[in-house]
Image: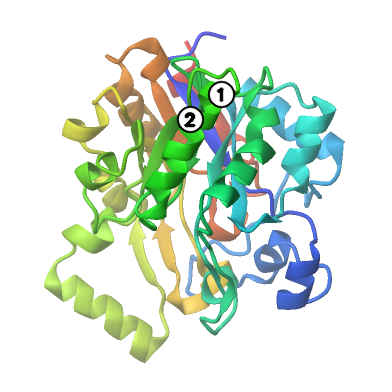
Amino acid sequence: MKVKARVIAFYLPQFHPIPENDEWWGKGFTEWTNVGKAKPLFKGHYQPRVPADLGYYDLRVPESRKAQADMAREYGVEGFCYWHYWFGNGKRLIERPFNEVLASGEPDFPFCLAWANETWKGFAHGMTNRNVLIEQLYPGVEDYIAHFYEVLPAFKDHRYIKINNKPIFMIYKPLGDPEVLVFMETWRKLAIENELEGIYFIGHHNDMKNSLQDIKNSGVDAVNTTRLNNYIINHRTFYQRVQGRLNRLLRGVALSYPYEVMSKYFLSKTEDTQENVFPSIIPGWDHTPRSGIEGLIITKTNPGVFSKHVRDVAKMVSNKEDENKVIFLKSWNEWAEGNYMEPDLKYGKQFLEALKKEIVY
């Protein structure tokens, strides 16, 4: 399959129960729990979202993981970027799906890892409070060494995605703590000691309060830009800001703007055309299954406007070296954020077909 760009899709592994989620949310909780309880908050609000072809899968099931990979490959996705949770002192969460993919060799589909180095708080995952559930720690070099050797078998797997012959490793918050720089220096040294050519660190840039240069200065090799909130933070008028706040406080209406308005600010020609800047494809967003009226909704999403967005992103990378024609797809299966490519009952595979039309020759 000849493609215009290397599309790597973020992949959420939280579709299986774990003891911690049982304790925090109730027995048997998975991401489907939030998806299933979602309700429309206004007329025309597309909720709940119901999965179609792949159903309410359990990621402990190998056949489900294979079906996802087969579908992604068919529509032009190069591989999955699994969210990876290491909280320090050896503590991991929701690691089972990826560990089983690694150990079994199936599916035979490229992958990489993105370290979600962020403290979990209740609000972001469906609670009304903002209590800390589990804190992201940076205990020091010994922990970074242990973390490296935990991940090393993945780096050496033939499926692992590389740039410049180095396994790529994304850091969600490259500015999250000064220790991140020590972490990267430690891993680069260990990579050479373990017969790798290095690590290709990619800093995730989704906080519009930071600049692209801030992320570059953090010591990463490249930056993934995700300007989902760019319109909200930088381009609304004063009146729109006040109106949004009043609607939420007085009328109980979640913040919402049309896809065609917000998507105009997803890209930057001066930034995303740079060789070591990798833009994102964003199919949609609706965080209300987790956060109710405090969520953000992108309304009027459809395959047509999404197709134009994909075309625009592909143009941004068209003149780069082939290896650097990287686009991150946010996301493959973030169902509780309304941010997914998997088929649902409303659109079926139309979003996947739009992606393929714009990416595959």
Query: Element under label 1?
Result: helix
Q: Quadrant of the N terminus?
A: top right
**234 sits left or right of 58 in the view:** left
Residue 213 x %, y %: 20, 42
Number of the label disc, if any, that sits on residue 202: none
Q: Are marks 2 and 1 in contact (CB under 8 Å)?
A: yes
Q: Position of residue 293 (x, y in %)?
A: 46, 78
The residue shown at (69%, 60%) is 31
Instruction: State the residue position of label 1.
Output: 193
Q: Three-letter amino acid code at disc 1? A: Glu
Residue 167 rendering spot, x and y as whole percentages: 53, 25
Tell me if residue 302 can be seen. no
Counting other residues with Cα less than 10 Å from the Cα at mark 1, is it few (<14), some (14-19), or many (20 or more)?
Answer: few
Image quarter for residue 267? top left
Q: Which residue is mark 2?
A: 189
Res 64 → quadrant = top right
The answer, for residue 12, to whether it is visible in the render is yes
Residue displayed at 51% across by 81% down = 130
Residue 111 relative to residue 276: left or right: right
User: Secondary structure beneath disc 2?
Assistant: helix
| Disc 2 residue type (three-letter) | Lys
Q: Is residue 58 above or below residue 299?
A: above
- Against 240, is 327 above or below? above
Disc 2 versus disc 1: distance between alpha carbons?
6 Å
Name which residue lies at 71% across and 76% down.
24
Horizontal side of residue 41 vs 21, given as left or right: left
